[in-house]
Amino acid sequence: MNYHFWPRALDHTFLGRRFSNPTFTLVGRYGHANIDTTSRTGDLKEDRYTFGLNYRPFEDFVIKTEYQVNIGGIERENADGFLASISWQF
């Protein structure tokens, strides 16, 4: 699920001033993993929910922040947390 938006109040800030069509994107994803094997530690299934916000000042560049929630038996410890990345020229 993606929702693109841009608040016009940001047009004259550093986020929008020098760019012709900047945008934010709210992102939501769901994933499921089921590893078909037996394990001494239990079930090897996991559900992942990801919620994020992307900032794209121009088409070929994006700054992404997201939070992942992992529910299941694949990870040995709590693997929930924040992630951040930068991508360009894709």
Image (spheres, grey):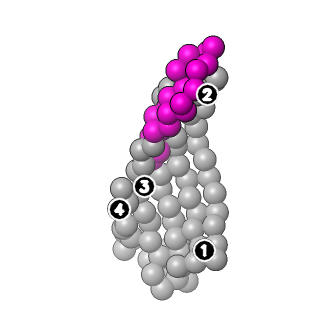
Depth-wise, is mark 2 or mark 4 nearer the camera?
A: 2
* Structural distance between the alpha carbons of marks 4 and 1: 20 Å
Marked residue nearer the N-terminal end (4 or 1): 4
Marked residue nearer the N-terminal end (2 or 4): 4
Residue appearing at x 55%, y 32% in the figure: 35
Indicate the amino acid at tag 1.
Phe
Above or below residue 59? Residue 34 is above
Task: Give the numbered dot on residue 90.
Answer: 1
Residue appearing at x 53%, y 75% in the figure: 57
Examine the structure image and report whether residue 84 is included in the region drawn in magenta.
no
* Structural distance between the alpha carbons of marks 2 and 4: 30 Å
Above or below residue 29? Residue 70 is above
Q: Which residue is mark 2?
A: 75
Indicate the amino acid at tag 3.
Val
Q: Which residues are magenta?
A: 32-51
Q: Which residue is mark 3?
A: 27
* Structural distance between the alpha carbons of marks 2 and 3: 24 Å
Q: Nearer the viewer, residue 38 or 33?
A: 38
Marked residue nearer the N-terminal end (4 or 3): 4
Depth-wise, is mark 2 or mark 3 nearer the camera?
A: 2
Q: Is residue 49 left or right of residue 81?
A: left
